[in-house]
Amino acid sequence: MPSHLPTRREALKAAAAAGVTVAMSRLPQLAAASAPPAPAPKRPAAPQSFAAKASMIGMPISITPLARQDLDALFDDMRQRAGVTAVFPFAYTHEPHRCGVPPAAGFHGGNYGIPHLEYYHDTPLTYADMRAPEFGDVDVLARVIPAARKHGIATFAFFLEDNVRPTAVPHWEALYTVDHHGRRSDRQPGGPCHNNPYYQAFTLGLVEDYARSYELGGIMWGSERQSGLLNALNLSQSNSVDPGQTTCFCEFCQKKGRDLGIDVERARQGFGEIEKFVLASRAGERPRDGYFTAT
Ligand SMILES: [Zn+2]
């Protein structure tokens, strides 16, 4: 055991001093005031090829052109006209616009690569649930990766979480958030619940599957969520969010809340009061003391 553990103040002082040292070493004109001048080290300029490799020009892309078009011509065009060095296909999605098709009732979507079931455990989703059927037997990732590489383009599987619950895949329902009225979410501001162990297991399986099954440049995971309070107050990326759909009150979030000492029922009542407040304001009912706003 060390004989003296630094206090918070001492630790901050040390960190600040270290920070100043680093900052001053990068600003010779300031360092000169407190340190003897030292000859500036001569550094060779970075070779141009290194600079070019250090930057990436990436392009998110829906699935349909990757499944149907002449990829050689497509990637040549991307490379020549835009200097693209990486493509980010929406490799797993149940939302038609990310697949690149018009909205349609019963759209299925899913994994546009092949799900390898050995990587998926403790999830209610089956192979048929996960495998996207829109392009028959085409494994879009297997089609894209070598074709892109020929043009110096790396492939990053882009897994952007769906907010809209896929009605064509009912097993997803148990993975979605629950609002403060106890209803399962089916759209913004809800989505799959990050505290749901079955969703965690699915995500882990998908990432491991992609990482082990395909020679990807990388994986990009996207989750566009805000807190329940911001959603209830309509301070969200989506307009006119229903303040009655504040999440999440699923069994797993309730347990996590209780374990953290949160009174779940009080929180539920609080969101109910916010819901009434927001709906009243939308109906033009002004509070007695008005609203405080800052811009
Ligand atoms: Zn939850």
Image: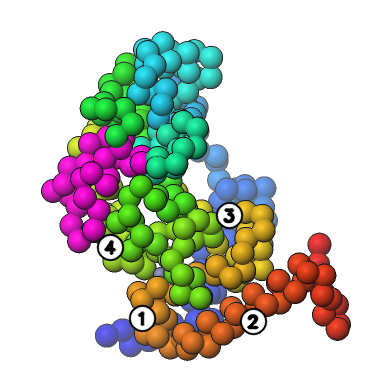
Mark 3 vs 2, N-terminal side: 3
Reading the image, the residue beneath label 3 is 23
Give the residue drawn at x 21%, y 50%: 126
Looking at the rendering, which quadrant does residue 155 occupy?
top left
Q: CA distance from mark 4 to mark 1?
A: 15 Å
The quarter of the picture where the C terminus appears is bottom right
Mark 4 vs 2, N-terminal side: 4
Q: Is residue 273 above or below residue 144?
A: below
Looking at the rendering, which quadrant does residue 220 occupy?
top left
- Label 1, residues with CA under 10 Å away: few <14, some 14-19, many ≥20: some
Mark 4 vs 3, N-terminal side: 3
Mark 1 vs 2, N-terminal side: 1
| Circle 1 SS class | helix
Looking at the image, how many numbered discs can be counted on the residues?
4
Query: Horizontal placement of 139 versus 9: left or right?
Result: left
Q: CA distance from mark 3 to mark 1?
A: 46 Å
Reading the image, the residue beneath label 4 is 198
The residue stretch that appears in magenta: 108-132
Can residue 71 be seen from the camera position used here? yes
Q: Residue furthest right?
A: 289
- Label 3, residues with CA under 10 Å away: few <14, some 14-19, many ≥20: few
Name the residue type under label 1. Lys
Q: CA distance from mark 1 to mark 2?
A: 22 Å
| Circle 3 SS class | helix
For the residues bearing labels 1 and 2, Cβ distance under 8 angstroms: no
Ligand 1 is found in which quarter of the picture?
A: bottom left
Reading the image, the residue beneath label 1 is 255
Give the residue drawn at x 28%, y 23%: 143
Picture coordinates of residue 294 (x, y %)? 81, 67
37 part of magenta stretch: no
Reading the image, the residue beneath label 2 is 273
Picture coordinates of residue 134 (x, y %)? 33, 31
